[in-house]
Every structure is written in structure tokens, then in C-alpha cells.
Image: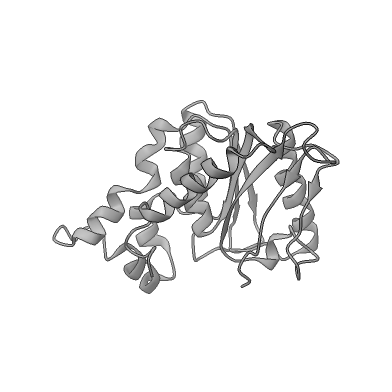
């Protein structure tokens, strides 16, 4: 309820203050941090890409909302968008809605400066794959390193085993490429999620990827994600 009508407000401030606190720990390497999110978390990635002020070395977004106005006309969940945005974009008398649309991630692309990997599924009618296409196009036109992974037979989540393998290969390959992690990284899995990080186990999440300073941890590097909500 706090997020509804205030997508770019307190929760974004919470993201940034939390990562700043963690980055200040002696065991964290603030020069090798990444930001990953799916669904609402994907929106968060697109928005943070325009305001993170070089905190992150790389982004990964899965099925995120990029353009609030086109999203309004595309989604199957219009009731949800009306609740979360506050109403349609053409209602100029609705202050909540106008604030929501004024803070759509696509309006801050001019501030994007960080590599981004984008996942989407062509059967996603909740957040249609065209949102990811818009984000990818914007990044490439701006000359930002970007990669689009589009599954023709997946929806909002990835369920097919072979596709899950592709998703994981692309996910960790992107982190390896930008030196946030590498092969041999220790990955902490939430209890009850033996198949993590296969995306089919989760619905909406945002998490940050940190690297340990050399010598601060036996593995030297760690991906840490605590207690994601289940679908």
C-alpha cells in the first residue's frame, strides 16, 4: 500500500540508503556492486538506472515497467495499474496519477550510463514484452552496453527447464563480464529455495549484489539475497 501511488518515492530512497549503509561495511567492495530486479523490481532497476549516481557497475531487469503511459494501454491488469498509478495518464486533475507518470523511468533515460541486461517473455501480458523492447532500444540508442534476452515461449516468469538454464547462464555471465562476480562465487540461497536462482520460484523482487573485499571472506566474493517473496 505504501508503494501504490508513490513508486518513485520512499521505496527508492530506502533502496539507496540501504545500499549505502551496506557498502560502508569493511567487508564490502563498493566498486563492484550490481542491482537486479524482476516485475516491480524490474521497474526499480529501470528507475535506479537514472538516479543511482554511479553506485552500480551493472543492472539486470526482468519483465520490468519502463514507460508508464504505454504500459497503461498494454497490460491485462488495468485494475492494478489504476490502483498503483492512481489512474490514467490523461486525467490532469488527478495529482497522484500525474506524479506517477512524471516519474516514469523512460523520462530519465538521459541519465542512464551503466550496462544493463534485460529479460522478457513474449507471453507476458501483465508487463508486456514491449516494455523491455523500449528500454533496450533506449539504452542502445544512447550507446550504453545492453543485452536483450527475449523468450518466445515464456510469460512473466521462466518455467521451462531449458529456458531456466539460459536465464542463469545469461544472468551470471553478465555479472562476470562486469566483474561483479566470477566463476566460483559463493551464492547464498534463501532457505526453502533449493532451485534458486531459477526465476520460476519468485514473483517480485529487487536485490543488490555485493562483492567482498579480498581477504575479508573465505570465498572473497558473495551474492547475498535474503527471503524473497514466493508467488
User: For this rendering, which residue is in front, 98 or 213?
Assistant: 213
User: For this rendering, which residue is in front, 147 or 217?
Assistant: 217
| 148 lies left or right of 15 | right
Q: Residue at x 67, y 55 (%)?
A: 225
Residue 198, by quadrant, is bottom right
Q: Residue at x 79, y 62 (%)?
A: 161
Q: Is residue 45 above or below residue 212?
A: below
Which color scheme is applied? one colour
| 86 lies left or right of 56 | left
- Note whether residue 151 is visible: yes
Q: Position of residue 116 (x, y in %)?
A: 58, 38
Q: Position of residue 139 (x, y in %)?
A: 50, 34
Q: Residue at x 49, y 59 (%)?
A: 40
Q: Residue at x 43, y 64 (%)?
A: 75
Outermost left residue: 93
Q: Position of residue 5 (x, y in %)?
A: 32, 62
Q: Is residue 203 above or below residue 215?
A: below
Residue 87, by quadrant, is bottom left
Q: Position of residue 211 (x, y in %)?
A: 70, 38
| 80 lies left or right of 172 | left
- Note whether residue 59 is visible: no
Q: In which quadrant is the C terminus drawn?
A: bottom right
Amino acid at each position: 500500500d505504501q508503494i501504490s501511488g508513490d513508486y518513485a518515492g520512499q521505496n527508492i530512497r530506502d533502496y539507496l540508503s540501504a545500499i549505502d549503509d551496506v557498502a560502508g561495511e569493511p567487508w564490502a567492495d563498493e566498486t563492484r556492486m550490481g542491482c537486479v530486479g524482476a516485475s516491480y523490481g524490474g521497474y526499480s532497476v529501470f528507475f535506479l538506472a537514472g538516479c543511482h549516481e554511479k553506485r552500480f557497475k551493472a543492472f539486470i531487469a526482468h519483465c520490468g515497467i519502463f514507460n508508464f503511459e504505454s504500459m497503461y494501454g498494454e497490460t491485462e491488469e488495468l485494475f492494478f495499474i489504476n490502483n498503483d498509478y492512481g489512474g490514467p495518464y490523461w486525467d490532469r486533475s488527478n495529482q497522484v496519477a500525474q506524479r506517477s507518470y512524471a516519474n516514469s523511468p523512460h523520462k530519465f533515460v538521459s541519465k542512464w550510463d551503466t550496462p544493463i541486461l534485460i529479460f522478457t517473455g513474449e507471453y507476458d501480458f501483465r508487463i508486456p514484452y514491449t516494455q523491455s523492447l523500449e528500454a533496450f532500444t533506449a539504452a542502445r540508442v544512447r550507446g550504453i552496453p545492453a543485452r536483450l534476452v527475449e523468450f518466445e515461449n515464456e510469460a512473466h516468469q521462466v518455467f521451462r527447464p531449458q529456458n531456466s538454464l539460459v536465464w542463469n547462464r545469461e544472468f551470471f555471465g553478465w555479472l562476470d563480464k562486469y566483474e561483479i562476480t566470477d566463476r566460483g562465487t559463493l551464492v547464498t540461497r534463501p532457505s526453502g529455495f533449493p532451485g534458486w536462482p531459477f526465476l520460476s520460484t519468485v514473483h517480485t523482487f529487487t536485490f543488490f549484489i555485493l562483492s567482498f573485499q579480498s581477504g575479508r571472506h573465505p570465498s572473497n566474493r558473495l551474492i547475498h539475497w535474503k527471503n524473497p517473496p514466493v508467488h
